[in-house]
Image: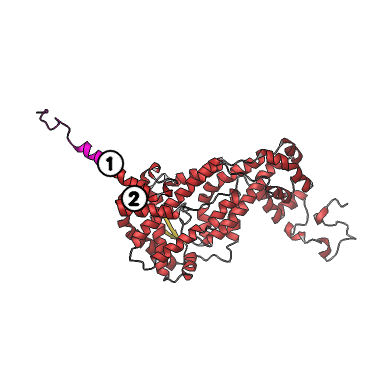
């Protein structure tokens, strides 16, 4: 048997057997990988091989549980032929739309503008600029999954696999990076604003539209392009007001995601029952064989099981997302009024778009089954609309002053009952204020006389 399988051996140094043309000395075409190197040690040659150098770089990633270099490369490479740079005219249109949107929102909400710089991003810019936000959301999930998988391996399996634990972590980073990169690449081709998924992805104070995606979205609707752009600018400006002036909201969303991550574990007994069978079917696990490790990770053996604590965290997350989306719907409807004739149709299109899910949901679902979807959107919109009609916009927005004032998932089961209780609470506060202002007996300088 050859000591150099798969043709990775060095070129034949016997002059009598060497092909003068050079064609037969590289039967598998690996010469190009060596960058034309003609000599040196194996280490020198490996260092000059672009393919292996890149693989070594990826495998040496130490920036966290997700290889974000790979995610970025994968997302952008998938857009190489599909992303168009923004023009000066598009940037001016986006800036005008966001300024007008803020003017329309001023009379219908107590929250001031949250946009201090309007931006028009290309798809590539969206990928690059939102990576920090995605990292803060996804890293805790990926870290728990990889940690749960490696810690749950039985001692016997760990001994048989040798350095599998360390390699599994690096392979997990590669796998997560590749999956997230694919999802972000798809999402960048569909997302219309920076706040569309319900969690702000742009830096604070930035109002963002993606002109290329907005144009494609408008092309499928029976409405003028400038009307669609203004409608989306209203939604983006409203989202930025909410997250810009409700300081705890962003953290609450992150805490719900992280609470879900803390509950991730795998069934060790299930692994102990199945590890021998899995390894036998693969002919053993070779820690230097990425395909074998990926087969183990993808076999379902190491998938986490959802716990009651995770389901509670998921309900909190879905409720918050629905409340954010419902509030945006409510204030945009009030601001648009009769100004945008197609507002009703556009709003329904957006509700269906969010309810049906998309790459944002797939990003989390692919990792650990966590979906970012406001399942209670219509119930939340009912709460905000009824609050506005019965108590005014100030009382509606007052609910954002503290997380304990917001409706819970149970409150959304009967949204009108929740709104009615707010009226009773308002009357109680008014009576309390009257009592506080009413002079007590003997307090008017008359000494009770």
Q: Position of residue 143 (x, y in %)?
A: 59, 43
Question: Quick check: is 432 in the magenta stretch?
Answer: yes
Task: State the separation of the CA atoms marked 1 and 2.
Answer: 15 Å
Specify the label residue 429 is tagged with. Answer: 1
Q: Residue at x 49, y 46 (%)?
A: 315
Q: The C terminus is located in which quarter? A: top left
Query: Quick one: SS at disc 2?
Result: helix
- The reply, left or right, for residue 107 in relation to residue 261 is left
Residue 205 visible in image: no
The tally of labels here is: 2
Q: Are marks 1 and 2 in contact (CB under 8 Å)?
A: no
State the extent of the magenta-drawn residues as a range: 429-449
* 239 or 341, nearer to the observer: 341
- The reply, left or right, for residue 177 in relation to residue 229 is right
Q: Earlier in the sequence, mark 1 or mark 2?
A: 2
Question: Quick check: is 222 in the magenta stretch?
Answer: no
Q: Position of residue 430 (x, y in %)?
A: 25, 42
Q: Position of residue 275 (x, y in %)?
A: 73, 42
Q: Residue at x 48, y 47 (%)?
A: 317
* Residue topped by disc 2: 396
- The reply, left or right, for residue 24 in relation to residue 349 is right
Query: Quick one: SS at disc 1?
Result: helix
Mark 1 is surrounded, within 10 Å at the Cα level, by few (under 14), some (14 to 19) or many (20 or more) other residues, namely few
* 25 or 266, nearer to the observer: 266
Q: Position of residue 206 (x, y in %)?
A: 42, 55
Mark 2 is surrounded, within 10 Å at the Cα level, by few (under 14), some (14 to 19) or many (20 or more) other residues, namely many
* 191 or 61, nearer to the observer: 191
As drawn, the residue found furthest toward the right would be 16
């Amino acid at each position: 048997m050859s000591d150099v399988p798969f043709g990775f051996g060095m070129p034949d140094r016997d002059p009598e057997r060497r092909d003068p043309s050079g064609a037969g000395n590289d039967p598998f075409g690996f010469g190009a990988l060596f960058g034309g190197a003609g000599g040196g040690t194996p280490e020198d040659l490996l260092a000059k091989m672009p393919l292996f150098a890149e693989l070594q770089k990826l495998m040496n990633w130490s920036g966290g549980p997700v290889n974000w270099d790979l995610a970025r490369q994968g997302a952008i490479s998938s857009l190489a032929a599909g992303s168009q740079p923004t023009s000066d005219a598009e940037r001016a249109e986006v800036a005008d739309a966001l300024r007008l949107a803020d003017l329309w929102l001023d009379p219908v909400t107590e929250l001031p503008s949250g946009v201090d710089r309007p931006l028009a991003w290309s798809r590539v810019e969206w990928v690059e600029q939102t990576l920090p936000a995605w990292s803060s959301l996804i890293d805790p999930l990926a870290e728990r999954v990889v940690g749960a998988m490696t810690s749950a391996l039985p001692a016997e399996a760990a001994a048989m696999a040798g350095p599998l634990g360390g390699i599994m972590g690096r392979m997990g980073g590669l796998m997560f990076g590749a999956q997230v990169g694919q999802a972000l690449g798809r999402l960048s081709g569909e997302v219309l604003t920076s706040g569309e998924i319900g969690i702000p992805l742009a830096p604070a104070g930035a109002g963002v539209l993606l002109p290329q995606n907005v144009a494609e979205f408008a092309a499928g609707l029976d409405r003028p392009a400038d009307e669609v752009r203004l409608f989306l600018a209203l939604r983006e400006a409203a989202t930025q007001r909410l997250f810009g002036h409700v300081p705890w909201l962003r953290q609450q969303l992150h805490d719900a995601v992280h609470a879900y991550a803390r509950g991730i574990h795998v069934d060790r007994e299930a692994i102990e029952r199945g590890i021998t069978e899995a390894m036998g079917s693969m002919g053993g696990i070779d820690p230097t064989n990425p395909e074998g490790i990926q087969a183990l990770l993808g076999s379902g053996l190491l998938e986490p099981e959802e716990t009651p604590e995770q389901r509670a965290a998921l309900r909190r997350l879905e409720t918050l997302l629905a409340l954010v989306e419902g509030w945006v719907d409510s204030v945009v409807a009030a601001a648009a009024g009769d100004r945008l004739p197609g507002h009703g149709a556009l709003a329904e299109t957006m509700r269906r778009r969010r309810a049906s899910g998309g790459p944002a949901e797939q990003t989390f679902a692919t990792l650990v089954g966590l979906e970012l979807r406001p399942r209670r959107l219509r119930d939340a919109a009912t709460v905000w609309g009824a609050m506005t009609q019965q108590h005014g916009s100030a009382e509606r927005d007052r609910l954002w002053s503290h997380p304990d004032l917001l409706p819970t998932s149970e409150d959304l089961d009967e949204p009108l009952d929740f709104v009615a209780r707010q009226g009773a609470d308002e009357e109680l506060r008014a009576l309390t204020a009257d009592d506080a202002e009413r002079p007590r007996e003997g307090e008017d300088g008359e000494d009770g006389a």
